[in-house]
Image: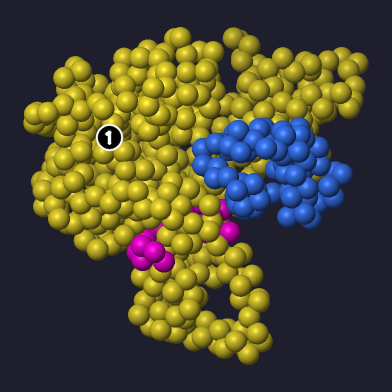
Amino acid sequence: MLDLRQYTCLGAALRDALDRFSSEICLIEADRDREKVRLTYSDFKEIALPLARALEDADYDAGDRAAIIMTNQSKWLISAYALFYCGGVLVPLDYKLTAAEHLQLLAHSKSKVLIVEYHLWRAIMQSSEFQNIGTKIVLVTEAPLGVELAGAFRWEDFKRKGAPDFVMRQKDDVACIVYSSGTGGRPKGCVLTHENYLEQCRALTAWYPFWPGVRYLSILPTNHAIDFMVGFIGPFVCGACVVHLRTLRPEFVRDAFVRYRITYVSLVPMIVKNLERGLRAKFDELPSWKRAFLDAMIAVNRALTRRRPKVKLSRMLLSSVHRAFGGELLALITGGAFMEPSTMQFFYDLGIPVVNGYGLTEAGTALTLNDLKPFRADTVGKPLPGVELRILNPDAEGVGEVAARSNTIMSHYLDDPELTLETIVDGWLLTGDLGRFERGGHLQLFGRKKNMIVTEGGKNIYPEDIETVFDGLSVKEYSVFAANYIWPKKELGREKLVLVLRLEQNQKFDGKLQEEISSRNRRLPDFKRVSGYLIWDKDFPRTASMKIKREALAEEVGKTADRKAMVGL
Amino acid sequence: METAEKTLDEILTLAAGHFKVPREKLSPDEDFFKALGIDSLQTLDLLTKLENHFRVELPDYELQGVTDFRTLAARIQARL
């Protein structure tokens, strides 16, 4: 791999990687079982540079922001490289947000350029807020010929001849603005520097290196911190190959493991659990003698890999399982949400380590990672090289808020100095997560101090962001909370949101109100919905400016009402 | 050419059969996550079944944000 210490920016590191590994395959893109794209590093450069030149000719300058809203595909990475080549700042947005949310974040980030897939652009054009879009240049990928694009350019045609000028950036220049949460009243745009990414990449590849020949299956959205690092920057600076699938249908994902002999993949816990369910069902279908043999092999593998993984041995002992994953899988990488230890242990016993870690968008990608020396299913691993962690105000069991200091920690929240001051104190990032150190320096997590949940799909949901769906609800007042924020639990997983309602005087909670709440709740994507409601019989505490004092309300509710008082929706 | 109503009816029947839910308990405007008690990954399984039945290919993005049977039927109908 490249020695990243010599670089001051991602653009320069990627530029050298394209030259150094020019004949290696860097990208494969498949739509279901149809391979659509296969590029060498040299091919990648040939497509990206004319785009960079066209952007420069369109007055896209160093420091200008450019948003990408795309599913995982080759044009995502090609566009990102072209933007870095011009010295630009990348704003990767979640393609699963609504058009209104996209427009809100485009405005918040003041993006000058937008690169977007046609179906997403079509939705944005149809949004009632579309006329207020401030983005100057819009490039639309895969637009059918002749369709109305409202002044946008077709990505495929937006290229110019002639070498673009490479724009060097310094380590403390901004590389990306990544939104760690949504869109309600207060978007959290994490401003991450080139140094943040270069340091993160060095730390991660020190423990889990890539090399030419490695094939990484990119399934997590590339806008997500994990895939951006291990599905783009990491593999590219090491000459490895990224495989994109245009569908997440389980049958095609399974097929891709085998077809492309995948080495690494990152998955959210929900998908890992789904894989576990599928494997367990297959094991249960085996004739009893085969099942007994399989169980014996698993037991042997477990005993022989207790101290560290032994890939070749596991592949020999459990060859049919490994063949189903393509035969070359080294690890499943997971993060972004709570992972059940039993699921990780299930895969580890099959000789497929699940490398879990812990991180926040605010901290680049990961703060801790399981180094498999030995494998521990009950922790989120050890701090990565260069990461300092400490536990603030530990209780008698050593549990307190996790604080982190590292060169990977964001510079600040975009246009929110107040929130930045609350979050980064004396150089330490206050994570809002509760944890303690275990033997061997492993970090264990026990819940959250902050009012938010993380779904099994790895989505951060802040209650404030979803309250707008209940605007105008026919009650006196309401507020949404993470249930574990009201009733703290020293555990993660199965996190829920609860709607706390204060009815008008003499108002009864009737079927009509219940239907109104349910109907509004259904307008939210399934992962953002509240799970239940709780009727509160006092006025909410408010500040002088009449904002709800959420912390005080949560504390009061938690002290007075039991978790069981929550009624399911 | 199937009519929109027929497409919707077939979807409800297929979904009920696939997830073993009584057909009469499903209604067109119902949230299928809740009605069928399924998560987003199980929805992908249902889509594969529907694609095979109607012999259409539905890109993942066509189904983003779709949560009720009627909208799902309209997306399929548009590709028949």
Q: Which residue is drawn at 42% across and 60% down?
A: A256
Would you place residue A275 above or below residue B69 in this image?
below
Residue type (three-letter) at the residue carrying disc 1: Ser
Quarter of the rendering containing residue A165: top left
Q: Which chain does tag 1 point to?
A: A
Would you place residue B60 above or below residue A493 in this image?
above
According to the image, label 1 marks what residue?
A79
- Where's residue B8, x and y in %? 74, 38
Quarter of the rendering containing residue A188: top left
Residue A266 is covered by the magenta coloring: yes
Q: In which quarter of the image is the C terminus of chain A?
A: top right
10 Å neighbourhood of mark 1: few (<14), some, or many (≥20)?
many
Q: In which quarter of the image is the N terminus of chain A?
A: bottom left
Q: Colour of chain A?
A: yellow
Which chain does the blue colour mark? Answer: B
Q: Residue furthest front?
A: B1
Quarter of the rendering containing residue A160: top left
Taking the image as shown, residue B11 lies to the left or right of residue A45, namely: right
Q: Residue at x 40, y 79 (%)?
A: A315
Work out whether residue A395 or residue B5 is closer to the camera in this orientation and state it. B5
Q: Residue at x 72, y 26 (%)?
A: A520
Residue A37 is covered by the magenta coloring: no
User: Which stretch is magenta?
Assistant: A258-274
- Where's residue A112, x and y in %? 30, 18
